[in-house]
Image: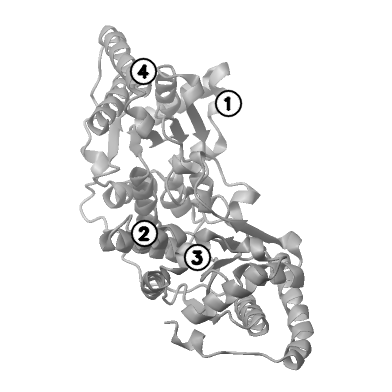
């Protein structure tokens, strides 16, 4: 993939002087249009050989355009906080919102490539990391991100010459260290691994562009024109949405669904509840304070369910059993303006817990395949692809050490009506009932179908759904606590 970037491309001073002002003006105009439209973000990944002009090019782009609307981030070794979360967490936090340009140095490609070169991972490990990257980039592109990937290349001879030149200049000598020369000795291995990484992740969604970095004028004009062309083309068709063939949910033929097979008569007495509650809360407390084992894991608890099914009460029985310093409850409502400017999983990635901590989601990322599907807040293509995106998200959390427990609390329509009526009559519970709750009741069957599809498509071995028969609050709370403890004991 690098042969065309070793041909000795050059641009004369005269040509550069003629083209640079026009390119700069056009980039500024395109950036202004992007900021005004706020239809999509631009994300530029910068990779390549040391000394190939990556930093100089990014500095120049910031100089040519308005830096207030450019978000430049450099990623080195992960901090302690970052190392205790899923690998992609730190990149998700830095995604640019719609209307802005994001530039990432040392993106999600760096660690897999370097690990393979240094022998810290094998071919299978590299393959797994690259497949994860492909899924991530496809999801970002499906969410509307304009993703550009620039690889700045130098031949081995060119890189050696460049490093010698930097060493000779007193102003740039600091940029070349013994570490850089040690890396140079591994040039051939880096080239081989990098070429494989680019080949396996260059596709229609996010192709790589290899830019020869030896001549700064050629390098700068090439990167600038590539960015300009991509922005102009997307701005011209920003209302276009790609049509994809989707596999529809199974049609309902016999009025038989997962939720209709539940035994909704399950109950326990108050006396048994008190005994069981103390037992399972005690075990949960011990597990969450286990410094030897739990410090290697985090706990993600996710609650979905019918309106008035008792999610809040169940959550309070969990938080009452663990140290308040080590958990966070995240109530999920309609997305804010800031959240709508990002891919929909962004707001949930931000709350991924570090090891030794617990995050409890009251509603969750499953809103995409529930309320957004039923109410038509997103297109069919959006919620259909969300199943695989969610499975991938949860897999990444599990690989990062998380224990993921997902609960669906189910009650009958008759029980829901009783609880709604009671809430309306009870002064300190009136805030719990809204017009939206009554509107949702009218779509009971549509929500039921969406729930069945959700469980069918996202209940996996590593993150299974637990469906809780929630007619009896005592039974509900004990079943949830027992499930959490047993999952933790299996994993710890």
- The answer to which quarter of the image holds residue 409 is top left
Which of disc 3 and disc 1 is earlier in sequence? 3
Q: Is residue 242 left or right of residue 129?
A: right
Callout 4 touching callout 3 (CB < 8 Å): no
Whether 161 is drawn above or below 8: the answer is above
Q: In this figure, which residue is indicated by the disc labeled 2? A: 118
* Label 2 Cα neighbours within 10 Å, binned few <14 / some 14-19 / many ≥20: few
Which of disc 3 and disc 2 is earlier in sequence? 2
Residue at screen point 20% across, 52% down: 254
Residue toward you, 399 or 388: 399
Q: In this figure, which residue is indicated by the disc labeled 1? A: 431
Residue toward you, 121 or 456: 121
Residue at screen point 36% across, 55% down: 387
Q: Which mark is residue 285?
A: 4
Q: Is residue 227 left or right of residue 278?
A: right
Q: CA distance from mark 4 to mark 1?
A: 31 Å
Q: CA distance from mark 1 to mark 2?
A: 58 Å
Which of disc 3 and disc 4 is earlier in sequence? 3
Determine whether the residue tagged by mark 4 lies in a helix, strand or loop: helix
Which of disc 2 and disc 4 is earlier in sequence? 2
């Amino acid at each position: 993939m690098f042969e065309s970037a070793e041909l000795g491309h050059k641009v004369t001073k005269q040509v550069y002087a003629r083209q640079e002002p026009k390119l700069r003006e056009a980039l500024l105009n395109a950036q202004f249009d992007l900021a005004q439209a706020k239809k999509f973000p631009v994300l530029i990944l910068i990779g390549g050989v040391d000394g190939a002009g990556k930093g100089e090019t990014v500095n120049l782009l910031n100089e040519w355009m308005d830096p207030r609307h450019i978000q430049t981030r450099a990623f080195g070794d992960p901090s302690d906080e970052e190392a205790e979360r899923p690998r992609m967490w730190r990149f998700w936090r830095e995604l640019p919102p719609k209307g802005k340009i994001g530039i990432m140095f040392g993106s999600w490609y760096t660690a897999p490539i370097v690990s393979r070169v240094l022998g810290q991972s094998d071919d299978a490990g590299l393959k797994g990391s690259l497949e994860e990257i492909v899924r991530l980039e496809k999801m970002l592109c499906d969410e509307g991100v304009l993703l550009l990937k620039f690889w700045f290349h130098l031949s081995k001879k060119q890189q050696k010459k460049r490093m010698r030149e930097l060493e000779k200049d007193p102003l740039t000598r600091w940029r070349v260290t013994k570490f850089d020369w040690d890396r140079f000795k591994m040039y051939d291995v880096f080239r081989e691994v990098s070429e494989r990484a680019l080949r396996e992740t260059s596709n229609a969604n996010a192709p790589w562009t290899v830019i020869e970095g030896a001549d700064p004028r050629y390098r700068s004009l090439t990167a600038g024109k590539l960015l300009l062309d991509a922005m102009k083309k997307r701005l011209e068709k920003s209302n276009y949405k790609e049509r994809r063939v989707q596999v529809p949910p199974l049609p309902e033929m016999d009025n038989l669904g997962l939720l209709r097979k539940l035994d909704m008569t399950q109950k326990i007495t108050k006396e048994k509840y008190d005994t069981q509650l103390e037992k399972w809360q005690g075990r949960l407390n011990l597990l969450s304070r286990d410094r030897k084992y739990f410090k290697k894991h985090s706990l993600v608890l996710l609650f979905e369910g019918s309106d008035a099914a008792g999610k809040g009460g169940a959550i309070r029985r969990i938080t009452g059993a663990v140290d308040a310093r080590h958990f966070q409850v995240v109530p999920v409502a309609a997305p804010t303006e800031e959240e709508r400017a990002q891919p929909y999983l962004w707001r949930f990635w931000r709350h991924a817990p570090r090891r030794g901590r617990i995050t409890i989601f009251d509603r969750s990322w499953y809103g995409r395949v529930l309320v957004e599907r039923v109410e038509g807040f997103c297109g069919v293509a959006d919620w259909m692809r969300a199943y695989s995106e969610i499975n991938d998200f949860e897999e990444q959390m599990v690989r990062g050490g998380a224990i993921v427990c997902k609960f669906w609390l189910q009650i009958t329509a008759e029980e829901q009506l009783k609880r709604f009526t009671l809430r309306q009559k009870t002064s300190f519970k009136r805030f719990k009932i809204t017009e939206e709750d009554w509107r949702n009741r009218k779509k009971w069957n549509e929500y039921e179908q969406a729930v069945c599809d959700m469980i069918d498509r996202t209940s996996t071995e590593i993150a299974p759904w637990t469906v809780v028969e929630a007619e009896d609050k005592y039974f509900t709370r004990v079943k949830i606590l027992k499930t959490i403890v047993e999952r933790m004991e299996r994993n710890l």
